[in-house]
Amino acid sequence: MSSQKQDYYSILGIARDASEEEIKRAYFEAAQRLHPDKNTAAGETELFLHTQQAYETLSNPRRRAQYDATLPPEVKPNLPYGYSLTYSRASLTRMEEPQMLYVILEMEAPLESRRAPSPPLNVCIVIDRSTSMSGEKMDVVKSTAIQILRNLRQQDILSVVAFSDRAEVIIPAAYHQDRSRLEARIQMIQPSGGTEIYQGLEAGAAEVMRSLDAKRLNHLILLTDGQTYGDEQQCLELAFRLGERNVGISAMGIGMEWNDIFLDMLATRTGGSSAYIAEPQDIKRLLLEKFHALAQVYADETSLITEPVEGAQLSYAFRLQPDPGPIMLDEPTLRLGPILQDTSTRVLFEYIIHPSAVKSDVANILSGTLKVSISSTPLPVPSFRMNIRLPVLDQPEAGSPPPEVVQALSRLMLYRMQERARIEIEKGNIEAGTRQLQALAANLMSQGERSLARTIALEVDRIQQEKGISAEGGKKIKYGTRALFLASPKKESIT
């Protein structure tokens, strides 16, 4: 096809109103993906040349204006994924008080992709080998890493880094042929020293970056059982840079002593997630499940770039599936995580709508750009301009929210109750925090979640005696309420 007949905006995967910075970034990403030094597949050199021509035209304001004048009216892009928006209410009400709006964004892979081969992997396992990892924890981690190495496909790249207060590359990123020798290197990992997570993250990131390829799923898995001190900000800055390069982080905390808030922040900056491993025997199952999920990825990254909208405040965002967890709101780019081949990605947004937003007959809620990266697609996926606007009425409409919104909010309420309880207890407001937990336990009991309700009741007794939440209890409650998003609703048994 002649380049003159192609849409330069589609070639770069950007909207027609893209800024100069967005054009530069899109060209850089496309050039990394299609450069002839990295690609020899038929047709990809021609695609690279078209990408260069698109950039040369769109980066020059005069040439861009001339080119825009030749374009036909814009039509809705043919996206290689499905999406839908579900609102808690069909309209807003004209009033002088703030009102709430909930929106669920769902994205899913097309049916045909579920039979397609999964993308090759470029994964680094970063293992905490500090003294506290001695014994069963380290034995299970090493045996599981060896099993993963044995299960690699020929096209997969795996690296392994072990760290304490310094890091060592146990297996460098490469295509591995002599796997028996590499297994021996894993077996030789011995616990010693303290925990400095940045040492491990930095070495692991370097291994992933050595083989960074937009056609691969680039990911880092961190396993630790301890807290790091003094290098948290360095870790978060590194995670932000990795997220910018579409490198994800999955963080797994083993036992009780690790900092779940920090690992959450670390992973979510890349669209990843954290997990709680209560017992050493659970390490194998959860680590293998993570690798299975990586092998089922269709789109390795989805992000929503938001723009300020007067009167509409995005106050909370939570990924409902596949890996439940909060979405960080401290940057304009919200990392929403991957789309799996067989599981849709669902994110719930909570908006506070202020009176200034409902003065006219239509309220603007969201103005943003949805970006999706699919490693199996040679060209960038077109960005999608997402605008949410709802009618404004003088009187509220009758009717109930859609069932999927009601179900999501009922479970989110439970998760946020434990969040609020933890905040109150950390402030020293023990009575207010325990009341929140008692209400949470009562709600869980009424929904048939007896085991988690009993865990909370025991923790309330401990809090009242010790005037603080325990490391173990806090994690069991936090990750237990997250797991509710993946479980089917339970019914009370009749006795």
Image (tube, rainbow, N blue to C red):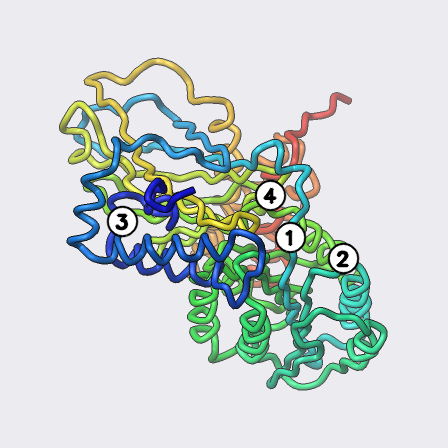
Which residue appears at 76% of the width and 54% of the height?
285
First in sequence: mark 1 vs mark 3 = 3
Which residue appears at 62% of the width and 53% of the height?
459
Mark nearest the camera among 4 and 3 is 3
Q: Nearer the viewer, residue 101 or 160?
A: 160
Residue 76 image position (x, y, % from top left): 35, 31
Mark seen at residue 18 = 3
Left or right of 266 on screen, residue 343 = right
Left or right of 482 on screen, residue 88 = left
Q: CA distance from mark 2 to mark 4?
A: 23 Å
Instruction: Say which residue label 2 marks.
Output: 282
Q: Amino acid at mark 1?
A: Leu
First in sequence: mark 1 vs mark 2 = 2
Q: Amino acid at mark 2?
A: Asp
Q: CA distance from mark 1 to mark 3?
A: 31 Å
Q: CA distance from mark 1 to mark 2?
A: 19 Å
Q: Is residue 325 visible?
A: no
Q: Nearer the viewer, residue 129 or 245?
A: 245
Quarter of the figure with residue 116: top right
Which residue appears at 74% of the width and 55% of the height?
288
Instruction: Say which residue label 1 marks.
Output: 294
Quadrant where the N terminus is found in the figure: top left
Quadrant where the C terminus is found in the figure: top right
Instruction: Say which residue label 4 marks.
Output: 340
Q: Is residue 317 visible?
A: yes
Q: Amino acid at mark 4?
A: Leu
